[in-house]
Image: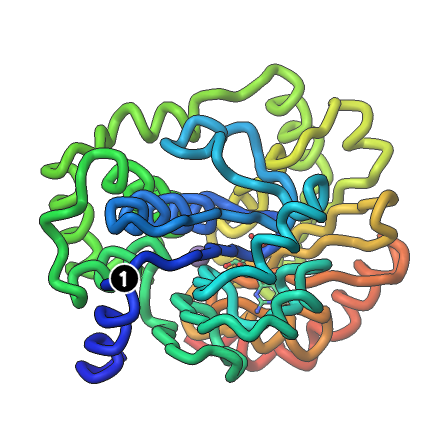
Amino acid sequence: MNKEEIERIKQLLSTPKKIIIVPHRNPDGDAIGSILGLYHYLLNGQHKVSPITPNNYPNFLKWIPGENTILKHDSQTELCEKLINEADIIFTLDFNAFHRTGKMEPILSKSNAIKIMIDHHQAPDDYATYMYSDVKMSSTCEMVYHFISMLGNLNKIEAKIATCLYTGIMTDTGSFRFASTTTTTHKVVADLIERGANNSEIHNSVYDTNSYSRIQLLGCALNNLKIIPELKTSYITLSQEELNKYNYTKGDTEGVVNYGLSLDGIKLAAIFIEDKNEGIIKISLRSKGVFSVNEMSRKHFNGGGHTNAAGGKSYSSLQETVEKFISILPTYKKALNDE
Ligand code: 5GP
Ligand code: MN
């Protein structure tokens, strides 16, 4: 984002506006943290601000400051669409294409509001009036921090905003351990702690709220883990029946794929989760080093994301999806064995 664009955005935000903030469907910690961090920041400017998510999100995010103000498009469709139609500005956060908002795609596509994108996913679509896209960023939350900084308002980041942004940086970097974590990320996080984010409490709220059944589901997933040593690959399956058996609720499988990637010598890890309700298999892919799961997901699994973390879906059965995965792996043999 250049200086001129920042000046224009400053001008735009200098008078009260009706603003919507939207993340991707099935929002994660970075999505919820970034929309709420920006929400608190913009509220200070006397705007009318509505955070709208396409659908619900996991319980371990339901303590983030301002979370109770979020409207959900799938259950409050009429109200959400009225607000979107009346909006002057729509911020789109943590996604790169309208289809990532699921059923919100049509209303967003036809809206005449000024769109401001803040996102770190690869290959962003060209819909935004102002586009702040940087695939090198650890998280959208880190970008919201830089955005506020570019507007010259770091001093406006108080404890609530710091808490929201810290949460998303923490979840999207796997607690500051993924390769996307830079020295700047650590400086941002240090500043957020100074501004009132309680790092230890945030960590506990997100990660130490497991139910017994969730741990059992993890046990089931780990039991199902398979490895293909010659292709440096591991994969996990979870059928709808298994999910039901352990009272699956949204977010319960978050992070499970990383166990497969933690195995010595493994470069590519996948998890296939059956969703009978939606009639799809939800796929998460993770990799180490230069192997791009973004490319693999785009090409074969109707998805995308980042080099080392991507999502996708399949409309075939669980077994057929796994078979397809195994059948395409040999085409990546060289890449998987490259150092
Ligand atoms: P997850 O496996 O946790 O669902 O997703 C991993 C990463 O890929 C996240 O950053 C997520 O936002 C992104 N992602 C998931 N599904 C898609 C998709 O269909 N398209 C794109 N571009 N990114 C995705
Ligand atoms: Mn993100």
The x, y position of residue 64, in whole percent, is: 40, 32
- Quadrant of the rendering where the C terminus is positioned: bottom left
Residue at image coords 36%, 24%: 204
What SS does tag 1 mark? loop
The x, y position of residue 250, in whole percent, is: 65, 35
Residue at image coords 36%, 47%: 39
For the residue carrying disc 1, how many other residues have a C-alpha within 10 Å: few (<14), some (14-19), or many (20+)?
few
What residue is pinned by disc 1?
15
Q: Quadrant of ligand 2?
A: bottom left
The x, y position of residue 223, in whole percent, is: 70, 34
Q: Is residue 230 visible?
A: no
- Quadrant of the rendering where the N terminus is positioned: bottom left
The x, y position of residue 153, in whole percent, is: 14, 56
User: On the picture, is 21 further left or further right than 203?
Assistant: right
**Quadrant of residue 136 within the rendered picture:** bottom left
Q: In this rendered view, identify the residue nearer to me: 112 or 222.
A: 112
Amino acid under label 1? Thr
User: On the picture, is 66 further left or further right than 56?
Assistant: left
Q: Is residue 305 visible?
A: yes
Residue at image coords 65%, 28%: 219
